[in-house]
Amino acid sequence: MAEYNLPLPAMGESIAEATIIRWLKEEGESVKKEDILVEIATDKIDTEISSPVNGVLKKKLFAPNEVAKVGNFIAILETEEKFFLEKISVEKSKKRFYSPLVRSIAKKEGINFYELETIEGSGEKGRITKKDMLKYIHIRKNNIIFPKPKYDNVKNENEEIIEMDRIRKITAKHMISSKNISAHVTSFVEADVTNIVKWREKIKETFQKNTGEKLTLMSVFVECVVKAIKDHPMINISVIGTNIIKKRNIHIGLATALPNGNLIVPVIKNADSYNLVGLIKIINDLIKRAKSNQLKPEETQGGTYTISNIGSFGNLFGTPIIHQPQVAIMAIGMIQKKLSVIETPKGDLIGIRYKIYLSHSYDHRVIDGVLGGCFAKKVALYLEKFNCYTKI
């Protein structure tokens, strides 16, 4: 029988490693092609790895809670299948074309067909380039195991040591990294959302009855943020060294609290291509699947701007931390009834209005106070001018 080295597959441009959660097969156990071998978790999402061949699980190379890099071999399978590089051709590969140079490099490095299929390509239609191959080979050769850290027993009877779970460790690392990378500044703006609140109250029951969808206000917030980004496109950027990368696509991340208290950020790709009904449907779907751990890795990647609804747990405003490599994030506060001065052609009046605070954190390396503050104000203006006669 031949040995097949199972690599940790590439799961997206920003994902470089994964934690082994649990093995579903034991060493010496027979496996069929497409059988799930192991559950893994990245900083984006939990997922599974299946066997690409029929055979036997000969050896596990990583234990639960250990971290593997993309390209690291995580298991050795024994199989009678012939899977070596000689099988590679345009006809054999249904997924994509491999150039003679790529096939030559793969053969030289002992990368078989199934492993080649896991490599993420940056070329046209996902084709693998020479640069992709060299990058993968570099990662593959550094097959480093990161053991689970050990902690001393509790010595003070009045204290309890609780080890962070995997998501909390990743979140902590990202928050510190973001603070170290970006010069955070936060601007605050108040917005009158009375028209939006009354509009929703008026049509929410009919809307849910007709569509089966819950009418949440997040769709309106996303729509107004998208409009403001179009007015101020330099908010929709990232930074690499001293270069500013201006994004043509508007991909909105929605910071979503999970039932266990952790956080995940599903992304609405091309958010400017949806009408309000479309936004309602995709937001409800993403949040529902996020909370049931059913998102695909690519659905948490590629965001260009993030919104966090801190009002959902009773907060008025905050200082959100930027989700790297983005340069700005907006927190939506809790809606409050407030006594307000209402300006009319006949003079000022005092009345009860629904108000929220928008907290806009941005990277002062590339966004000055004028742009950061004007963007927040523009979002507020779009909220206040929301057409309460919108038909959905």
Image (cartoon, grey):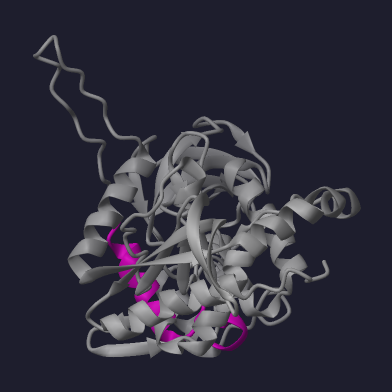
Q: Position of residue 87 (x, y in %)?
A: 63, 72
Q: Position of residue 103 (x, y in %)?
A: 52, 81
Furthest residue toward front: 346
For the point 37% across and 72% down, the residue is 328
The one of 65 and 343 positioned closer to us in this rendering: 343
Q: Would you say the magenta stretch is mainly helix, strand or loop?
A: helix
- Residue 364 falls within the magenta-colored stretch: no
Q: Point out the stretch of residues depicted in magenta.
A: 121-144
- On screen, residue 237 above or below 392: below
Apparent side of residue 87 relative to residue 77 in the rendered image (left or right): right
Residue 144 visible within the image: no
- On screen, residue 59 above or below 285: above
- On screen, residue 165 above or below 326: above
For the point 90% across and 53% down, the residue is 210
The one of 261 and 30 positioned closer to us in this rendering: 261
Quadrant of the image occupied by residue 188: bottom left
Furthest residue toward left: 155
- On screen, residue 214 above or below 218: above
For the point 19% across and 29% down, the residue is 150
Q: Position of residue 270 (x, y in %)?
A: 62, 77
Quadrant of the image occupied by residue 347: bottom right
Q: Position of residue 246 (x, y in %)?
A: 42, 89
Apparent side of residue 104 relative to residue 65 in the rendered image (left or right): right
**Total number of numbered discs in the rendering:** 0
The one of 329 and 199 positioned closer to us in this rendering: 199
Quadrant of the image occupied by residue 159: top left
Apparent side of residue 182 relative to residue 275 in the rendered image (left or right): left
For the point 63% across and 39% down, the residue is 31
Residue 211 visible within the image: yes
Apparent side of residue 366 relative to residue 334 in the rendered image (left or right): left
User: Which quadrant is the C terminus positioned in?
Assistant: bottom right
